[in-house]
Structures are given as structure tokens and as C-alpha cells.
Image (cartoon, coloured by chain):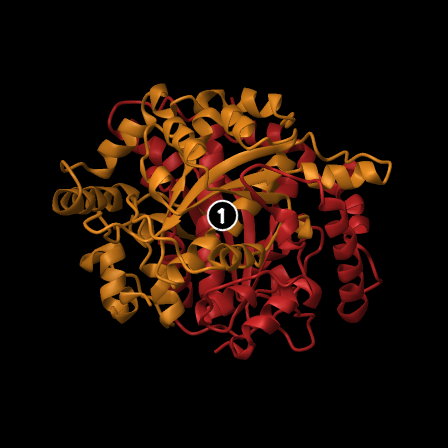
Chain colours: A red, B orange
Amino acid sequence: MNTALTVSKEEALALRYGADAIPAAGPWNDHIALLLSHRSVRGYRPDAPPDGTLETLIAAAQSAATSSNMQTWSVVSVTDPAVKAEFARIAGGQKHIEQCPIFLVFLADLSRNERLARANGTELEVLPYIETFLIGAIDAGLAAQNAVVAAEAIGLSTVYIGALRNDAARVGELLALPPGVAGVFGLCVGYAAPGVTNQVKPRLSQAAVLHHGTYDSTREAAHVAAYDEKLSAFSGRFEMAQTTWTGRVLNRMGKLKGLAGREKLGGVLRAMGFPLR
Amino acid sequence: MNTALTVSKEEALALRYGADAIPAAGPWNDHIALLLSHRSVRGYRPDAPPDGTLETLIAAAQSAATSSNMQTWSVVSVTDPAVKAEFARIAGGQKHIEQCPIFLVFLADLSRNERLARANGTELEVLPYIETFLIGAIDAGLAAQNAVVAAEAIGLSTVYIGALRNDAARVGELLALPPGVAGVFGLCVGYAAPGVTNQVKPRLSQAAVLHHGTYDSTREAAHVAAYDEKLSAFSGRFEMAQTTWTGRVLNRMGKLKGLAGREKLGGVLRAMGFPLR
């Protein structure tokens, strides 16, 4: 099913953190090995997965927690090649959106609850608040992550497409979204193409991310320096020019152009029916 | 490990959707059965889980995708009973926060990347935008959901605590969060107490949530009516007074008091260093 499950606990942790930064993890089993084996994949074979795969993934997604059972998310499955090509364009030329057999757009959806209220002759006072949009976005995130785990459990690969937010208004038009619904991100699902970079990417040391009792960044600089070295070596081995984490973060976050249109997201969401008060 | 894994595919889908609304799911295995078996638990035994459980959960969390590998989230593990009691109060009296042996607060964290830039004598222009806060919140959500799956894989139970956002400023004080960091939600982890309601909660029909090609709500009212009946029967069997989904949604979302302070979240986040432009 997933060859990563044959990797030992120590190997899995070393792939994720580097051999010099293995956390003192305890319980371990195949479920956890599957989670540790995640890697995002940006190239797909056209082969369709078995019948019912989409429904299995959505059953997993709907099984995730949802705030107060409000279920403020929905998902659109997109197969039309022309629409997928347009999404690829919005996302800055991500060809894997056109390649993957299953492309999902996860939505923050307050409109269903709003229709419910209208059908009952009332209104939902909480809708205009940023809190309620956030609930929809987080609900969508928890659901999507369960879909990702389910996909990887049956040998499929995935990659999130946050870059759909480069033009959330156009995504809304393409999917005929009513007011109060917005695409939060896309998700490619399919079989990884041969030769596609497909390695477990190292992350920051646990000590840089996990705090005990209160937030404490006093030793962070050392962890970041170690990680810079690790990610640079990883890039050199598997991907492209050697780049440190620092270099990548400054490149992606330093200049406004890194947002590729997403600097307008607040205004776009307001126009789509989320006042974000 | 998890008794739910002995449940068949058909039974698992019937528990989640009702026997009359089973989706045409395809691939199935123990990983997917685990995801389908999720239920939120609001009562815990005090027993500590095995050594290294926290580190296992965080390794799973860090293995989730993170937008452009920016890793804009952190987590605080809280064990101080006085602090947990204060969180329980903020969350409107949720005693399980005091009971659970592991209580985590997941954070949207732009401050680490900001420190990185400052150490390199520069600034991150993308920080003030709502898009960048959203990336932190979604990163935290994907990470937390992996932690939830890992916890349930080793026989632990969980419940998300969105109600920490009732007073995000006080949460920030208690955790000594610097500007650019905010608690997105809490997560209780522990062994379910005997007798605690612990049943798989039915969700809306897949047909109400999954759209094909474009968003289409034309048949939604019938799905909601069927779900109202289902959730009302479920409540009567396992929880409390029979309440339809419609009744619950109107109660939680109809009046501003349902936000319990979260109507101020936008202003609070701005004061915590997220301009949300």
C-alpha cells in the first residue's frame, strides 16, 4: 500500500528532522508511519483511481471535527480540462492541476447555514464576523487534511494549492459560488508521475515549534541555523539550487509580489459576501 | 488499538451518514476506518499516556503540508492546572480542559519568520495581510488534524476547543505570546472517561457537501430535512433533548451572543500584531 510503512520509527523521524534532531517520540504504529511519510507531489500520471475513491476521500473529510457541528465547508470536484487549465493559470502555472485525475476545491461555506435560516424566516447574526469566516476556513482545513491522509493511505499522492487565492474572485466565478462561499485552497490527488521529486522534506526541529507552558524563542536562532543547513543539503540532493530556509522565507515573504495577488484577498472576500468585521 | 477498526466499511458509513444515505465509497482499509471512527470526546480520565506521546503527536503534526514550507504555526503544551482552569473558564466552563492530561494550544505564528527577517536586517512585506494570517491559521489546522489522527491511532481521544477565541487576548497573555502569534484553537488529548458520550455523530449527506463541476444547492433542502431527522434521533438516543440540525444552527449562529466574545476577534487580532489588511 505505502512503501513508507516499511520504514522504521527511527528512520522516519530522521527523514523528517535529520538524524541529529530526532525527537523523543513514543508510541508508533502504521497509522503514525503513514502520517510521517507525507510528501507533497507536483506531477501526476493520468490514471484514474478506483471507482468510489472520491466518495471515500469525502467520507474521511466529513469525519473530521467541525466547529459546533456547523459544517461550514463544502467541496467542488473539478474534472473539466478547460476549468483545470484556468485554475493552473491562476495558480501561476502549476501544471499538476491539469494532470491530476481528482482536483478538489475546498470552500469556506456560510451560505448553506444562511439558506437554512432564510427558509426558517430568520437571519444569522454571526455571519458578518471574521470569526465565522475563520471557522469555515479551519473546518475546510481539517476536512481536507483527513482527505489527504485517506488518499495517501491508498497509495495516492496530493498537493495543496493555496495559490487559488491569487484570484479568489475568478475561482468563485468558475465554480458558480453564491455569496458567502469562497475557495480556501485546491487539492490535487492522483498517482505520482515517475521521476517526480517525492522525498520527505525535513522540517524545523520540534524544539523550535513545540513550547512548554509559555512561548519561548530564546534558543530558536540555533535551531533555525541547523535547519538552514539541513534544507540546503536537501535542496541540493533532490530539487534545485541549494537554498536555505532563511533564503526561501525571505524570497516568499519579503516582498509584496510574493503574494501574487493575494494582497487583495480581504477586499475580494468582502465582495464575495464575507464582511470580515 | 482502536475497536472501531473492527467495524465494516458499510457499518462505518452508516454510522456517519445513516443507513439511507451511504455514499458509493470505494477503497477502504484500516487507515480510512480510523478516520471514519472519529468522535469528539468531552470527558477524560487523568491517566497520563505513554512517555513520548506528545513528541509523537507533534511529529505527526509537523509532517502535514505547510504553505510554501513557511511553517507559520507553533504549539504550546499546557500542564499547569491553574492555567488550564483559566482556559476552561475562557471556553465557557469546558471542564475537559482541566481533566485531559495533554492540552495543546495551536498558534498561527508569523513571529518566527519575522525574527528570521530581522536577524537578516530586513522585513517581511507580506505580514500585514489577512492572507498571511490565514496561512498561519490553515497551517495550524492541518497540523492539528494530523495530531488528532495520530492520537486516535493510539487509542486516545480528542476535542478541539475553538472557544479559546472567546478571549484570544487573555490566551496570549497566559502563554506569553509575542506580537504576530495568536491561539487559533485548543486541543484536549487523553483517554475517554467511562460513560462519556462517545458515538460517531452523523453528518450531512455527501450530496449536500460535495459538488461536481460547479456549486449546486438545488436539492439541498431535502438533504437538510433528512439530516434534521437523523440528528434529532441521534440526540435523543445519546445526548440530550432531541434537537434538529436546523435548531442547533439557529441557536448557535442566529444571535450575536452565540459568538461569546468572538465578535471582537478582528480587533483583538489587530492589537496582537495582525493588521489583517
Q: Residue at x 62, y 39 (%)?
A: B109
Placement of A277 over or under B239, stated as above or below: above
Could you say where residue A131 lies in the image, as x and y percent from the top left?
A: 47, 29
**Image quarter of residue A139:** top left
Pointer 1 local density, CA inside 10 Å: few below 14, some 14–19, many at least 20: many
Q: Is residue B267 left or right of residue A127?
A: right
Percent position of residue A110, x then y = 41, 35
| Residue drawn at (80%, 44%) of the image | A250
Whether residue A214 is situated above or below residue B193 in the rendered picture: above
Q: Residue at x 80, y 39 (%)?
A: B117
Specify the subunit that label 1 lies on. A
Horizontal arrangement in the rendering, residue B232 relative to residue B64 (left or right): left
Identify which residue, B237 or A177, lies in the foreground: B237
- Inspect this view and state whether residue B85 appears: yes
Estimate the x, y position of residue A114 in percent, counting from the top left.
Answer: 35, 31
The N terminus of chain B: image quadrant: bottom left
What residue is disc 1 on?
A: A141
Q: Secondary structure at mark 1?
A: helix
A250 shown above or below B272: below
Q: Quadrant of residue B173?
A: top right
> Where residue B221 sits in the image (x, y, percent)?
26, 41
Residue under the point 49% across and 47% down: A141
**Does residue A77 appear anywhere in the picture?**
no
Point out the image quarter for the C terminus of chain B: top right
What kind of residue is marked 1? Answer: Gly
Identify which residue, B120 or B211, lies in the foreground: B120
Where, by quadrant of the figure, is residue B251 drawn?
top left
Query: In the drawing, does residue A275 fall left or right of residue B198?
Result: right
Q: Nearer the viewer, residue A101 or A141?
A: A141
**Is B27 located above or below residue A158 in the figure?**
below
